[in-house]
């Protein structure tokens, strides 16, 4: 899983907020899908440019990540490098596009988890909220003793409702 850090946590939270406030969401559009919305927040590249970069090579996000070559000079690979620099791993992005990370899914109630659809904005929001809560827990646990008074498990209905 991604390396928990304040910059990644903030980017995830901002992505959640933008989606809740009506940011364009279209799973079949490389710049407005699950990964595309997070990539917009981290890289500040527009959804149109992300899509254009992706169309220079074939495949969806999973295939683009599998073909990733940091030295290629292709805009999509440069953008992926920026996503990895913030603490994400390629597997995180592949899972994000499919809402499939087992560690995140185990923290989503079964009834919701069994009906998750990779192309439904509400399900993406639930997945992102759960992921950010996990990262916040990991980050808090890694901090000096003064911050360890934060409850070990922050995931709750109240947190997931923000």
Image (cartoon, rainbow, N blue to C red):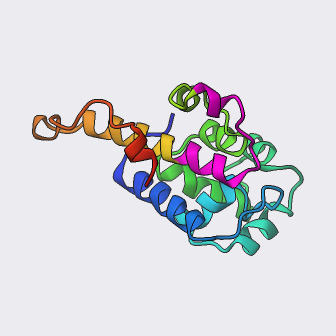
> In the image shown, does 111 or 105 lie closer to the viewer?
111
Residue 109 spot, x, y in % from top left: 55, 29
Side of 58 relative to 9 (left or right): right
Which is more toward the observer, 30 or 155?
A: 155
| Residue 16 picture location, percent across and down | 53, 58
**Which residue, as the protein is rendered here, is positioned at the far left?**
146
x 67%, y 33%: residue: 100
Q: Position of residue 88 (x, y in %)?
A: 53, 45
Residue 118 visible within the image:
yes
In the displayed structure, would residue 80 be above or below residue 152?
Answer: below
The range drawn in magenta is 110-128
Measured from the top left, where is residue 49 in percent x and y? 74, 73
Residue 132 vs 41, above or below: the answer is above
What is the chief secondary structure element of the magenta stretch?
helix
Nearer to me, 109 or 92:
109
Q: Which residue is depicted at the point 69% across and 40% down?
A: 94
Is residue 84 one of those drawn in magenta? no
Outermost residue, right direction? Answer: 58
38 vs 151, left or right, is right
> Could you tell whether 29 is left or right of 104 in the image?
right
Image quadrant in which you'd find residue 81: bottom right
Q: Quadrant of the C terminus?
A: bottom left
The answer to whether 69 is drawn above or below residue 103 in the figure is below
Query: Which residue appears at 36% of the width and 47% of the height?
Result: 5
Q: Is residue 28 above or below residue 21?
A: above
Tell me if 12 is positioned left or right of 26 in this view. Answer: left
**Residue under the image location 68 percent in, 59 percent down:** 36
Q: How many marks?
A: 0
Residue 4 visible (yes or no): no
Foreground: 83 or 6?
A: 6
């Amino acid at each position: 899983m991604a390396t928990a850090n304040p910059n990644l946590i903030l980017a995830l939270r901002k992505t959640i907020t933008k989606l809740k406030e009506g940011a364009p969401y279209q799973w079949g559009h490389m710049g407005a899908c699950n990964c595309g919305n997070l990539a917009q927040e981290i890289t500040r590249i527009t959804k149109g440019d992300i899509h254009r970069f992706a169309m220079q090579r074939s495949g969806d996000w999973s295939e683009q990540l599998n073909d990733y070559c940091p030295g290629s000079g292709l805009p999509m690979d440069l953008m992926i490098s920026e996503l990895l620099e913030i603490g994400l791993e390629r597997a995180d992005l592949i899972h994000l596009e499919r809402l499939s990370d087992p560690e995140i899914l185990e923290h989503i109630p079964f009834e919701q988890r069994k009906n998750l659809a990779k192309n439904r904005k509400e399900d993406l929001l639930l997945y992102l909220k759960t992921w950010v809560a996990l990262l916040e827990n990991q980050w808090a646990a890694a901090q000096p003793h003064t911050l360890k008074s934060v409850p070990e498990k922050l995931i709750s209905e109240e947190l997931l409702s923000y």
